[in-house]
Image (spheres, helix red, strand yellow):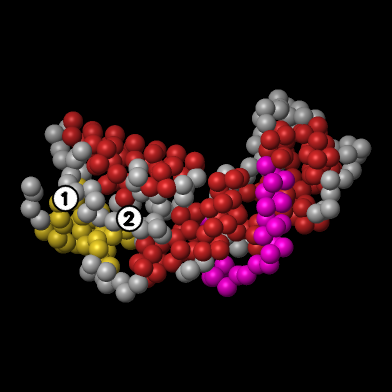
Amino acid sequence: MKKNELKVSVIIENGMVRKEMVEIFYSEDYDLLNNFDGNRLGSDEQKESGNYSANEIKAFDSRVNKLVASMQKRIADGKEGFDKNFPILVAVIDGKKVNIDGQGRKAACKRLGIGFWYRILDQKFDTMKDLINYTISINTTASSWKITDKYKAWAIANDRKDLLEIMLDCTKKFDIAENLTLMVLFKNQNVCKKNNFNIDNIKIKTYTEQAKIDLYEILNFRQELINAIKGLRDSEGHKVAIKKEECLHAIVNFYCQNSKLNRTIAVKYVAEYYQKSDMKIFTANTTLFEKFLNRCALNHDEKI
């Protein structure tokens, strides 16, 4: 068994790169480091929990497969599989070692049956909330957290189980990103932008029971539209998806203005006019797609 080492380690935190002398530890015990609920999917065992969407599992496997390939190349080059210059980052809380950055690397090591190196943070955490909020704030790996990971972690850390349950349920049922679920719930496209994680936007947000009902109605309508055009081509012979964020904003706006509309008829005309229109134009932004929906569903005799 390898001994502990003092090592100059590369630290990337909040976008800044620095080197510092740290004590690192070696282990081949894959159960030594605990994952926590606020972190993103980080082990093959967690995949079976039912708390992660198909897309999250796919992203995890892709991430770990790349790490496995990188480690295999290092081994083939005569190096140690795990690069000790980038140790797993560990915090201690309630006497337990918690993996806060490096779950994918540990999973890759387990798949290969090799050991890993880790370092323990000097910083102390009194509560799991403090630990989760710290984990959200750091950016220490090449594969940093997605915006959806941060929203779920924040909900766990701040006892917003209501939002967490809604996000998880909608991700499973409608294959939609967590931040977009919140955007629809609050009917505000500026609340949870993909490239701007700002928890101040939602920490004081509340919603009514009707807003929750509307959320599922809107996402069902969106899914019906997606299913209706599946396999179809537009007037230019292209298959143009309507899953992107701009289209969802348009669907929300359209629904809010026409909640009493017969959805079956609306979906029928959208599918019909999809094939007659250049959808690359109509899906270019929210305004144009909303215009398309209005023309199809409300004024379907009018030329698109």
Q: Residue 210 falls in which quadrant of the image? A: bottom right
| Residue 197 appears in the picture as rendered | no
Name the dominant secondary structure of the magenta segment: helix
Residue 221 at what x, y percent from top left?
72, 45
Q: Residue 206 falls in which quadrant of the image? A: bottom right
Q: Real-space Cα distance between discs 1 and 2?
A: 16 Å
Residue 158 at what x, y percent from top left?
47, 69
142 relative to 227 in the view: left or right: left
Q: Are marks 1 and 2 in contact (CB under 8 Å)?
A: no
> Which image quadrant: the C terminus?
top right
Residue 106 at what x, y percent from top left?
27, 47
Numbered label tally: 2
Work out which residue is located at the far front of the displayed protein and give it.
49
Using the image, determine if residue 277 lies above or below residue 217: above
Which residues fall within the magenta stretch? 195-223
9 relative to 195 in the view: left or right: left
Query: What residue appears at the point 78 percent right and 39 percent down from the top-left corner?
Result: 267
Query: What residue appears at the point 36 percent right and 49 percent down from the top-left corner?
Result: 42
Dot 2 corresponds to which residue? 35
| Residue 123 appears in the picture as rendered | yes
Callout 2: helix, strand or loop? loop
Using the image, determine if residue 235 lies above or below residue 82: above
228 part of magenta stretch: no
Callout 1: helix, strand or loop? strand
Disc 1 packing (10 Å; few <14; some 14–19; many ≥20): some
Which disc is residue 27 wearing? 1
Front residue of 191/96: it is 96
Amino acid on which disc 2 is placed: Asn
213 part of magenta stretch: yes
Query: What residue appears at the point 51 percent right and 64 percent down from the top-left corner?
Result: 161
Disc 2 packing (10 Å; few <14; some 14–19; many ≥20): some
